[in-house]
Amino acid sequence: TAGITQAPTSQILAAGRSMTLRCTQDMRHNAMYWYRQDLGLGLRLIHYSNTAGTTGKGEVPDGYSVSRANTDDFPLTLASAVPSQTSVYFCASSHEGGSTDTQYFGPGTRLTVL
Amino acid sequence: GQNIDQPTEMTATEGAIVQINCTYQTSGFNGLFWYQQHAGEAPTFLSYNVLDGLEEKGRFSSFLSRSKGYSYLLLKELQMKDSASYLCAVTNSNYQLIWGAGTKLIIKP
């Protein structure tokens, strides 16, 4: 099985442009997450979804939006990108949200905003 | 506030043993995870501790002391492929994972 896939692998984006990072999982996990990883910092949670149709804000949600129309997909949208959003973005999923279930990560998207 | 502390970098020799420490202060505690992350790749699950004590899994062991807010990951019989970053993460009272910045482990022959 593929597990979790993310697209694109990397992207260079002009400031002010919008972009959607895609994430798809085939494990039928209820919960999905978006993190960003920056040098010298731990992974920081942007948004999460405990089940299809619901979403919640994490530690650093400003400038990002998400939707969860079905179980498999959890896209992350940057409406108007800024250079501080340059980062590596990881999507993750777990069997259940609001639990201690192990989170499994996608391969990441490296985004550069110029 | 919530804080996870780990050493930034450690160096060890192939075949040796290394201990990576993690201390934490979080709003509530529902367990501690260790993940491995090779450069340019995704984090992968190594271990989970929720009770005090040592959990052994092959060459890797993880220890937890909840009263001290302390954990360590012990890697034995080090191999070159163990060169990676090791991430400590704590599940807080809201069941959100709070992550440390990671410890980069360099293995020398």
Image: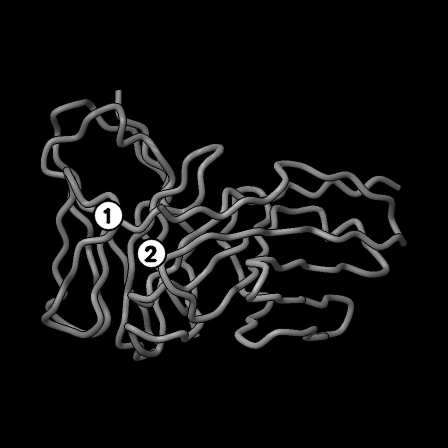
Counting from the top left corner in percent of width and height, residue A60 is at 24, 43
Q: Residues within 10 Å of mark 1 (few under 14, many from 20)?
A: many
Q: Which residue is located at x 38 percent, y 64 percent?
A: B28
Q: Chain of mark 2?
A: A
Residue B39 appears at what percent x and percent y? 58, 42
CB atoms of marks 1 and 2 within 8 Å: yes
Element type where label 1 sits in the image: strand
Position of A92 with respect to A46 (left or right) is: right
Residue named by callout 2: A91
Which percent across, then down, holds residue B7? 63, 40
Alpha carbon separation for disc pair 1 and 2: 9 Å
Q: Chain letter of disc 1?
A: A
Indicate the amino acid at tag 2: Cys
Could you say whether the residue bearing mark 2 is in a helix, strand or loop?
strand
Q: Quadrant of residue A83?
A: top left
Image: B44 above or below B11: below
Q: Residue at x 33, y 67 (%)?
A: B95
Compared across the picture, whether A21 is left or right of B92 comes to left
- Residue type marked 1: Leu
Classify residue B70 by image quadrant. Answer: bottom right
Question: Quick one: which residue is furthest to the front in this view?
Answer: B67
Which residue does the numbered mark 1 point to in the structure image? A21
| Residue at left offset 32%, top offset 35% | A111
- Viewer-side residue, A11 vs B91: B91
